[in-house]
Amino acid sequence: MNLRLNSEFGTLKAVLMHRPGKEIDRLTPYNKEFLLFEDVPYLEAMQKEHDYFTDLIKQSTGATVFRLRELLMQVLSNKEILESLMKAALSRTGQVHLCDYILDRLSTAECTTVLTAGIKVHELKKKIPNAPTGELMDYAFIIPPSPNLYFQRDPMALTPGGIIFSSMNKEGRQREADLLRTIFENHPEFKEHVNRLYPINGHDNPPSIEGGDVIVLSKKAVAIGNSERTNEKAIYHVAKALLAEGTVERVYEVHLPQKRQYMHLDTVFTILDENLVLTYPDAMNAVLQTSLYTLKDIKDDKVNIKRQVLKESLLTILEREIPHLEILSTADGNPDYAMREQWFDGANVFAIGPRRVISYNRNIHTNRALRNMGVEVLEIPSSELSRGLGGPRCMTMPLSRSRI
Ligand SMILES: NC(=O)NCCC[C@H](N)C(=O)O
């Protein structure tokens, strides 16, 4: 599988998703903010909504849907990989000394659950009574859960030049990128096809970037949000790697206001066809500045890039980048409905083919505006999935699309 994507809308051929699991049941009214949720979801209903979404993707496109849990289990059957991932997880809470106890007593399937849903002291003691947990309280997490794993968009990004492995900005999501990188760098289905653009070698604590901030504008241009989650140092390194690779010629850095509801660039705009974008107008107007990175030269293997601050609005820049661009506003521009629907990711639809999207059913005004524009809109239920504040694009990691 060629792990490069040159569009956001080519007909979907393969996608990676994660069915919400036990990690969701870890959310409480007291930890939900730290774990980046707006509310405490009802897991069974959430799973039904997610299953509906997955089935719809399969039926409407015939695409292969890879499951994170399955891929992770397959990779973790290698003992060295399992040990290194478990150690990395335990070192975040200073509990590496428990690693051997866990690996000796838990099966690969149990370890996979521990690495996604976390494990508490009393749960570990039940399975391994002699584990040296010291003074830790019974209800403390030895490994914290990753309830945002169903937002598969964020721990990595595919571009025309290769893969960016994220460095997650918020503590509550940091382990997710470790899981994804371990899968893609080791699974026989993928490992030969990874051209890693980020993190660059030798970075232990790389500047933060999240996949939801990366949007492929065309095979020659990529936009990256400088946002609550992605910072300018990471964008600089990614731009350098992308431009040096040679496929992409322009990397745009889009400065968004650092607000939760605009947390990633894909919460405020998505591309639906070669000349159609869906935007949330308030956020587009709030863009602080856009800069353009291009290649200056490569001398003696040293890559030099240049950064130019652009004077025009983001929409003008997009119009120049994408010929004959049509811009559709969420809720057709009605400010009240657009605001309501943007909170539940109105602009974050998932394109499964040119002018074919999957959207939350709750965003009725945006869905109507899309249909009036000739877009086929397939709706999914959204009462529980939306409680994590991410939409259909956020929940999917496309791995292969028909080439444009
Ligand atoms: N690309 C996206 O916008 N993803 C949504 C992520 C939501 C998650 N609860 C978070 O705050 O990171």
Image: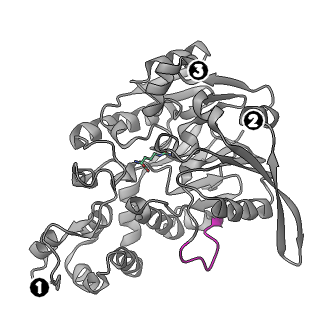
Work out how far the residue at label 2 is from the one at label 3, CA to CA, in angstroms.
26 Å
Point out the tag, 2 or 1, that comes first from the N-terminus. Answer: 1
Tell me the mark number nearer the camera, choosing from 3 and 1.
1
Crowd class of label 1 (few under 14; some 14 to 19; many from 20; radius 10 Å): few
Crowd class of label 3 (few under 14; some 14 to 19; many from 20; radius 10 Å): some
The kind of residue on which mark 1 rests is: Asn
The kind of residue on which mark 3 rests is: Val
Q: How many marks?
A: 3
Q: Which residue is mark 2?
A: 313
Bounds of the magenta segment: 195-205
Q: Quadrant of the C terminus?
A: top right
Work out how far the residue at label 2 is from the one at label 1, CA to CA, in angstroms.
62 Å
Say what secondary structure mark 1 lies in.
loop
Tell me the mark number nearer the camera, choosing from 2 and 3.
2
Contact check, label 3 and label 1, Cβ < 8 Å = no
Tell me the mark number nearer the camera, choosing from 2 and 1.
2
Task: List x then y, in percent, for residue 75.
Answer: 41, 69
Task: Identify the residue at image location x=34%, y=46%.
Answer: 37
Task: List x then y, in percent, for residue 375.
Answer: 58, 20
Task: Identify the residue at image location x=73%, y=64%.
Answer: 241
Majority secondary structure of magenta residues:
loop
Say what secondary structure mark 2 lies in.
loop
Q: Which mark is residue 375?
A: 3
**Residue 128 visible in the snapshot:** yes
**Residue 280 visible in the snapshot:** no
Q: Which residue is mark 1?
A: 130
Picture quarter containing residue 40? top left
Magenta span has 196?
Answer: yes
